[in-house]
Amino acid sequence: MMKTLRLFWVLFVLLSALVITMPVVAQTGVVDLTGETGSVKEVEVHSRGMAYTTSEIRVNLGDTVRVTYVNGGGRHDWVIDEFEGARTAVIAGGRSETVEFTADQAGTFEFYCSVPGHRQAGMYGAFVVLD
Ligand SMILES: [Cu+2]
């Protein structure tokens, strides 16, 4: 009995260490993709409560942008009005959806949640396209 408990304890400690050392998947704060050379600029945007953990995304004019929105809880979406295809469905917590679009105009735009009241509550961020 004690041996089994000790084994569980050792496994627990090992698994905890593994989780702690795993790389952070969510890209938080300002995500600057302008220096990346790949043909598709990828970003994973998470939300926690009524806020996205990414505050700003920067890309270059003409970039193909692939955004995966990971919903941390509640019913939300991820939308930019000015770009064709930059809109996920409203998804439930724990779900994710990927959209791809072309950043075909320069400027500063806003990504936001289109569920009524959420944008006003702070669920938005900046999408910057540099020329
Ligand atoms: Cu929302």
Image (tube, rainbow, N blue to C red):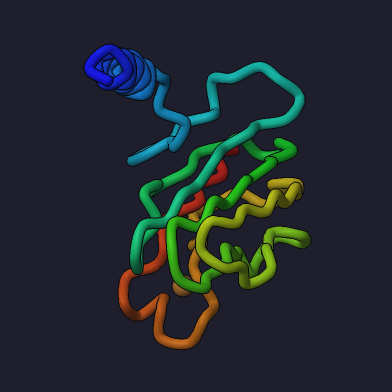
* Whole-percent x, y for residue 109 in the image: 51, 59
* Marker count (numbered): 0
- The quadrant of the picture occupied by the C terminus is top right
76 over 16 or under it: above or below? below
Quadrant of the image occupied by residue 62: top right
Residue at image position (42%, 20%) is 23
Q: Is residue 21 visible?
A: no
Residue 43 is situated, as x and y percent measured from the top left of the image, at: 57, 37
Residue drawn at the location 60% of the way across and 64% of the way down: 80
Instruction: State the residue at coordinates (27%, 20%).
Output: 1
Q: Nearer the viewer, residue 49 or 60?
A: 49
Question: Looking at this view, is 94 or 51 the one in front?
Answer: 94
Farthest residue, direction bottom = 116
Horizontal and vertical percent for residue 112?
49, 67
Q: Is residue 27 left or right of residue 92?
A: left
| Residue 43 appearing in the image | yes
Q: Is residue 56 left or right of residue 16?
A: right
- Indicate whether 104 appears above or below 17: below
Q: Is residue 117 above or below residue 4?
A: below
Residue drawn at x 31%, y 77% is 121
Up/down of 15 relative to 61, above or below:
above
